[in-house]
Image: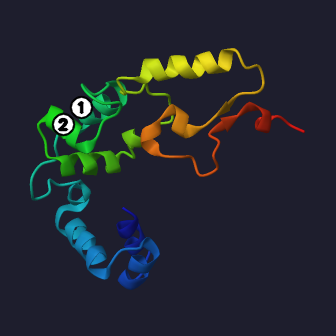
Amino acid sequence: MRIILGSAGGLPGRTLAREIGVSLPTVQGWLDRYDEEGLAGLEDRSRPGRPRSTITPEVVRRTLEEKPPRGTHWSTRLMAECMGLHHSQMGRIWNAHGLKPHRVRYFKLSTDPRFVEKLRDVVGLAAGTGDRLLLRREELDPGHGPDPAGVAASRRDRRAP
C-alpha cells in the first residue's frame, strides 16, 4: 500500500524502493498489479510450493505443556519421533518460535537411578553440620572426576565477612 500511495504522491520508483527497503522490480511489480486489477490486486495471493504444515501449533503446545515419555526434556529427535516428523523439521519449528527446551530455567528431577540415594546422603551430611558443610564433588559423584578447586560447595565461604 505504501508503494501505491508513494507513487500516487509523485515519488519515482527508485526513491520508493530505497525508502521502503525493497528492490525496484518489486516496486514495479506491485504498481503493475494495481494498474491491472485495482485494489483487488493488492490482496495476498496463494504462493507456489508445498502448503504450510498445520502441525506447528501442536508441536509448540506439546513442547511447552507436556513432558517427554523418557528423559527430562524434549530433544528434536525425541519430539520428531513422537510427532511422526523429521528431526530437522522440529529444529526449524522450534527456531521459528524461539523454543529451546534444552535450556529451560526450572528444576527438573534427575533421571539418575541412584538420585534418591545420593540426595539422602547430601541432606544427611548437611543436617548435622550447622554452618561447617564442606562437600567435594568426587565424594558425591566419582564419575565426573575431581573438582578443579577441590570444593563444590561451602557454607562458610558464602557468608559475608
Which of the 4 image quadrants contains residue 85?
top left
Q: Residue at x 51, y 21 (%)?
A: 119
Label 1 sits on what residue type?
A: Glu
Query: Callout 2: helix, strand or loop?
Result: loop
66 over 22 or under it: above or below: above
Residue under pointer 1 = 58
From the viewer's side, name the closer residue of 95 and 47: 95
Label 2 CA crowd tier, 10 Å (few <14, some 14–19, many 20+): few
Compared across the picture, whether 46 is left or right of 126 comes to left
Residue under pointer 2 = 55
Query: Callout 1: helix, strand or loop?
Result: helix
Q: Percent x, y for residue 13? A: 36, 81
Instruction: Please tell me the numbered disc located at residue 74.
Output: none
Q: CA distance from mark 1 to mark 2?
A: 5 Å
Q: Percent x, y for residue 116? A: 44, 18
Colour pattern of the rendering: rainbow
Label 2 sits on what residue type?
A: Ile
Which of the 4 image quadrants contains residue 94?
top left
The C terminus, quarter of image? top right
From the viewer's side, name the closer residue of 113 and 28: 113
Q: Residue at x 20, y 52 (%)?
A: 88
The N terminus, quarter of image? bottom left
Q: Are marks 1 and 2 in contact (CB under 8 Å)?
A: yes
Label 1 CA crowd tier, 10 Å (few <14, some 14–19, many 20+): few
95 over 71 or under it: above or below: below
105 over 41 or under it: above or below: above
Which of the 4 image quadrants contains residue 127?
top right
